[in-house]
Image (spheres, rainbow, N blue to C red):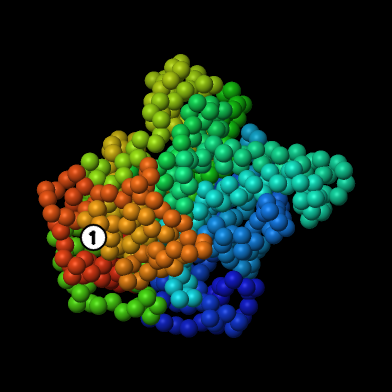
């Protein structure tokens, strides 16, 4: 692992301390009390730096505007470390070649090389994969960085609303606008007019995102995003200008962890995707990637996008060699290996039939010779967890101006099934982007992760049960984050916390979030729609309808917690992509 010094101050001379295989700590001479601790996940520092800030094609605001925009209620810069951390982003100092301006993790620069619909040529700031898939666990002043884990502090909904407020305030407050213009060197009346027009056009996109796409009856809070609904609304309602297709995002879920995702048979909580190109490009379609869905025909630019496919292929390959994180005993305490051994036996007995365990069960080789980790797909009716994700997106779509350019089976119809409408739009966008690259068949196969196309039909109303290696670092739990720690995952559902505070400190005892209420915490009410923490219950009674295991003794629960802390048992262990070298 390449050493580098990272702290929330200016880049300074690096010192490094080598610790056990699971841990490396980066410090500076002036930040010894505030280190960033990296675990051995088989990535170099360059891997991390690129992942934190690479361009996936998303364009929120012109880069120069984002650098100099003020918050709504003052003169602090919106991109400042303090404001970024206010909404759960992880600040980074300048110094990395991928982040010369010191933006927080998950925000990078993207270039729109040719005009696409409402997006002119230029450099823009936009989110990357790491925006939602990077975690920092804070404990007693120490900060443990987990690459590829769900963003446990990010409040995306609040961040978008704050960005919208900042843009609206800049457009209505003459002094605030003038300060922005001065920072950008727009001093002449003509330059100010041009800047205002640019700002108004871009602010409209975030206004729509804040007041329509992310508008929900109650706030999601940190660590939760209704990503599937956001993607669907942007592709079927916002971009083509068909507001009737808007769905209200009432099914927030925590972003899944990314280690073993390329190796797994299915991804997403609802087990709907196999092809990584569709998965990764579909994500960017939901977060500000410029796409033209207003032109009349493909010849006029319809389905043109700012897809950065080579970068998405690179990140997928990089994720193929991302190891699940091992528990850092020097930070969170020693693992009781005897207790973990007992927990392993309990896991094999009660959990492994759904949650695959190392060295994993694998599929048979496909026609390309690739095998994939079997991912359990448990019917929602059996596991009994919150069903809202399957109900949030409206079932039918109005086809509007896209009526006559859809596939033959949908063409000419005023309303069609929503899933088919979204899928046809997505295929057209991906097809146009791939065609521009003039990929060879071998390159296209690699981009699709050696999956057989077309993929099998997605299963209906299931929840993914992936291997649990590294799960200790991914609180809160259940797909919707309705359970604060691993211990509560092992009790009868009726005994779980019905309301709890989502804080920023890690709890290494119950393994999850510290639920102590205080300034900066968010109260999660599990009685609200989309927030239920029912199901996945260990209790007496027949299996099914939410009961997935027997009532455990407290000793058994703690043994299982200890086992889950202990996996992966080998720090830096990467799951081989395509299957083990020696297949049975």
Residue carrying label 1: 490
Residue 208 is drawn in which quadrant?
top right
Whether residue 233 appears in this view of the structure is yes
Would residue 282 appear left or right of 536 to someone viewing this image?
right
One can see residue 431 in this view:
no
> Looking at this view, is 277 or 324 the one in front?
324
So how many labels did they put on this image?
A: 1
Residue 91, image x and y in percent? 57, 64
Q: Secondary structure at mark 1?
A: helix
Residue 42 image point, x, y percent: 41, 68
Residue at the (71%, 56%) spot, across then down = 74
User: Which part of the image, by quadrant, shows the C terminus?
Assistant: bottom left
Above or below: residue 40 compared with residue 253: below
Residue farthest to the top, as pictured: 412
| Left or right: residue 330 compared with residue 428 | left
- Whether residue 111 is situated above or below residue 237 in the rendered picture: below
Q: Give how far across and how far down residue 301 sits, in percent.
A: 60, 30
Up-down relation of residue 175 to residue 245 (above or below): below
Could you tell me residue 440's position as x and y percent? Answer: 46, 43
User: Callout 1 environment at 10 Å: few (<14), some (14 to 19), or many (20+)?
Assistant: many
Residue at 60% across, 50% down? 162
Residue shown at 49% from the left, 76% from the top: 141
Q: Residue at x 19, y 77 (%)?
A: 338
| Location of residue 515 by image quarter | bottom left
């Amino acid at each position: 692992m390449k050493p580098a010094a990272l702290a929330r101050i200016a880049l300074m001379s690096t010192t490094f301390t080598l610790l056990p295989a699971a841990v490396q700590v980066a410090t500076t001479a002036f930040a010894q009390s505030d280190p960033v601790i990296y675990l051995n996940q088989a990535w170099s520092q360059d891997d991390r730096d690129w992942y934190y800030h690479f361009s996936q094609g998303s364009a929120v605001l012109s880069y120069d505007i984002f650098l100099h925009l003020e918050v709504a209620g003052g003169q602090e810069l919106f991109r400042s470390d303090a404001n970024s951390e206010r909404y759960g982003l992880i600040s980074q100092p300048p110094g990395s070649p991928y982040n010369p301006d010191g933006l927080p993790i998950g925000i990078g620069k993207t270039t729109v090389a040719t005009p696409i619909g409402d997006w002119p040529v230029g450099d823009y700031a936009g989110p990357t994969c790491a925006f939602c898939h990077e975690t920092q666990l804070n404990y007693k002043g120490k900060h443990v960085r987990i690459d590829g884990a769900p963003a446990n502090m990010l409040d995306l909904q609040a961040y978008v609303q704050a960005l919208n407020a900042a843009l609206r305030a800049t457009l209505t407050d003459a002094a605030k606008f003038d300060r922005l213009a001065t920072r950008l060197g727009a001093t002449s009346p003509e330059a100010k007019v041009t800047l205002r027009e640019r700002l108004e056009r871009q602010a409209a996109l975030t206004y729509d995102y804040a007041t329509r796409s992310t508008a929900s009856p109650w706030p999601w809070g940190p660590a939760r995003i209704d990503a599937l609904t956001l993607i669907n609304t942007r592709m079927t309602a916002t971009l083509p200008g068909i507001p009737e297709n808007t769905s209200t995002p009432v099914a927030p879920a925590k972003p899944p962890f990314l280690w073993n995702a390329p190796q797994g048979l299915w991804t997403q909580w609802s087990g709907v995707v196999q092809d990584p190109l569709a998965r990764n490009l579909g994500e960017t379609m939901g977060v500000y990637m410029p796409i033209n869905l207003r032109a009349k025909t493909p010849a006029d630019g319809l389905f043109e996008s700012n897809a950065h496919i080579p970068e998405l292929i690179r990140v997928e390959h990089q994720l193929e060699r991302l190891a699940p994180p091992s528990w850092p005993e020097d930070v969170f305490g020693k693992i009781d290996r005897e207790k973990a051994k007992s927990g392993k036996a309990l896991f094999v007995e009660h959990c492994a039939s759904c949650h695959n365990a190392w060295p994993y069960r694998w599929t048979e080789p496909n026609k390309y010779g690739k095998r994939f980790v079997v991912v359990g797909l448990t019917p929602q009716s059996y596991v009994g967890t919150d069903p809202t994700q399957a109900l949030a997106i409206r079932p039918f779509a109005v086809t509007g101006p896209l009526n006559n350019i859809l596939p033959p089976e949908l063409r000419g119809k005023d309303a069609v099934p929503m899933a088919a409408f979204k899928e046809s739009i997505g295929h057209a966008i991906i097809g146009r982007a791939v065609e521009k690259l003039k990929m060879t068949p071998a390159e296209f196969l690699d981009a699709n992760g050696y999956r057989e196309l077309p993929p099998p039909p997605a299963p209906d109303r299931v929840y993914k049960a992936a291997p649990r290696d590294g799960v200790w670092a991914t609180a809160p739990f259940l797909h919707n984050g309705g359970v604060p720690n691993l211990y509560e995952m092992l009790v009868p559902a009726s005994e779980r916390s019905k309301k709890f505070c989502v804080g920023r400190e890690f709890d290494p005892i119950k393994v999850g979030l510290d639920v102590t209420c205080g300034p900066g915490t968010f109260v999660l009410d599990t009685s609200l729609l989309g927030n239920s923490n029912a199901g996945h219950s260990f209790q007496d009674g027949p299996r099914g309808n939410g009961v997935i295991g027997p009532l455990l003794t407290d000793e058994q629960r703690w043994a299982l917690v200890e086992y889950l802390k202990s996996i992966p048992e080998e720090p830096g262990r990467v799951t081989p992509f395509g299957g083990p070298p020696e297949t049975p």
